[in-house]
Amino acid sequence: MSGKVWVEKRTDPDRPDRSTDAAVSPFKVLTILVRRWRLVVLVPIATAVVAVGVAMAFGDYTARARFAPQSSGQDLGKVAGLAASFGIAVPGGGASEPIDFYVDLVKSSGILKDALLSEYRFSTKRDGGEVRSGNLIEILEIEGDTEEERIRNGVDALKDVVFADANPRSGLITLDTNAPWAELAEGMNARILDLLSAFDRNRRQGQARAEREFVEERLEAAHNDLRSAEAGLAAFLDRNRRPYQSPRLTMQLERQQRQVMLKQQLYGSLAQAFEEARIEEVRNTPVFTVVDQPQGSARGNDNLIATLAMALLLSGVLVVALVFALEYLSNQSGSADLEELRQTLRRLRRDPSAEESAA
């Protein structure tokens, strides 16, 4: 007779089988989600509402312009090189600024403050709605206890709705402005372009003024040196009627003539540079070309649906992960998966408040 012993595995009908805990069944997942349905449903909806509100706060319309910076019309490098020959450094030197300079300039506080305090007049609709006017502090209702605080808050707000991007290959800079109204977005874009042009024009004219003053000073000195050299040559010829009869006098004569010629060339170059600097000082032509004008470029924000879907998806994933984390921490136990789901649904139908106690 074999010594086999049969052991009967007894199960308690009121106690779930722990051997199946490692494998999470769909019924178990659904039970957990139903038990905390308010958290699963309400949190993604609230997150989506907040995300759409933030997207709308950034502006319902986007206006776009593209422009290409240009170098100044005058070859100011010639003046700078002339100054360097005297051991004097002149700022600028006529070199054009890199396009990244304009990208940073768009976001600078000085440009944004001027755009904030500028007056705008626009219609709230393309077909002639309500006409509004004022600066951006009044239009966008920027809050603050003092005027300085409102300006500071307004500049910070513009940094969130004004964007610039440079393409090094094409040399074009894209300027985007967002606003609740199409005409306001276009007006803000055009105003920032005007401020950039005025900044560059004033900077160029200031540089030309400094160079003109330098050249004017050197021109007067060169004129005096030329007069002195010419007087020295005349005096030498007065003293030596026949200088070519003596080799020594011939060398002195040639030396005097070379000095006069060099000073004449220097004086001529300075006179030309002086006239160019005077012209550049009063030049008011723009230093960049607007390739795409902002007028008529405003388009509605089509990203609201995508923002809503993304917010629902991300918040849903996070909430589900949070629910299972809470379930794991609470270490709850119950009946079999299917039976527990059925009981949970029955309790919800009888008494919705029972869901909270079950959670």
Image (cartoon, grey):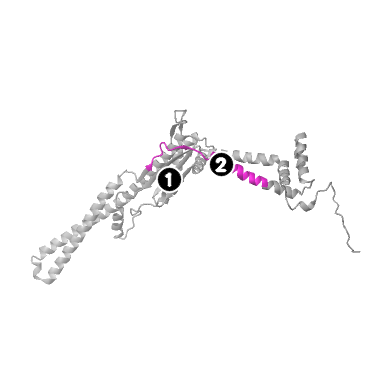
Task: Residue at 63% x, 41% y: name it.
Answer: 44
Q: Position of residue 296 (x, y in %)?
A: 41, 36
Question: Vertically, is 149 above or below 212?
Answer: above
> Which amino acid lies under the numbered mark 2 shown in the image of this protein?
Thr
Task: Residue at 73% x, 52% y: name it.
Answer: 23
- Tell me the mark number nearer the camera, choosing from 1 and 2: 2
Q: CA distance from mark 1 to mark 2?
A: 23 Å
Going from N to C along the chain, the mark reached first, 1 or 2, is 1
Quadrant in the rendering for residue 269: bottom left
Q: Mark 1: which secondary structure?
A: strand
Query: In which quadrant is the C terminus drawn?
Result: top right
* Crowd class of label 1 (few under 14; some 14 to 19; many from 20; radius 10 Å): some
Task: Residue at 73% x, 41% y: name it.
Answer: 35
Whether 42 is among the magenta residues is: no
The residue wearing badge 1 is: 174
* Crowd class of label 2 (few under 14; some 14 to 19; many from 20; radius 10 Å): some
Q: Mark 2: which secondary structure?
A: helix
Is 54 positioned to the left or the right of 275 in the image? right
> Which amino acid lies under the numbered mark 1 shown in the image of this protein?
Thr
Q: Which residues are magenta?
A: 291-320
Question: Vertically, is 4 above or below 288?
Answer: below
Is 141 positioned to the left or the right of 225 in the image? right
Whether 310 is among the magenta residues is: yes
Q: 267 or 240: nearer the eye? A: 267
Q: Which mark is residue 307?
A: 2
Query: In which quadrant is the N terminus drawn?
Result: bottom right
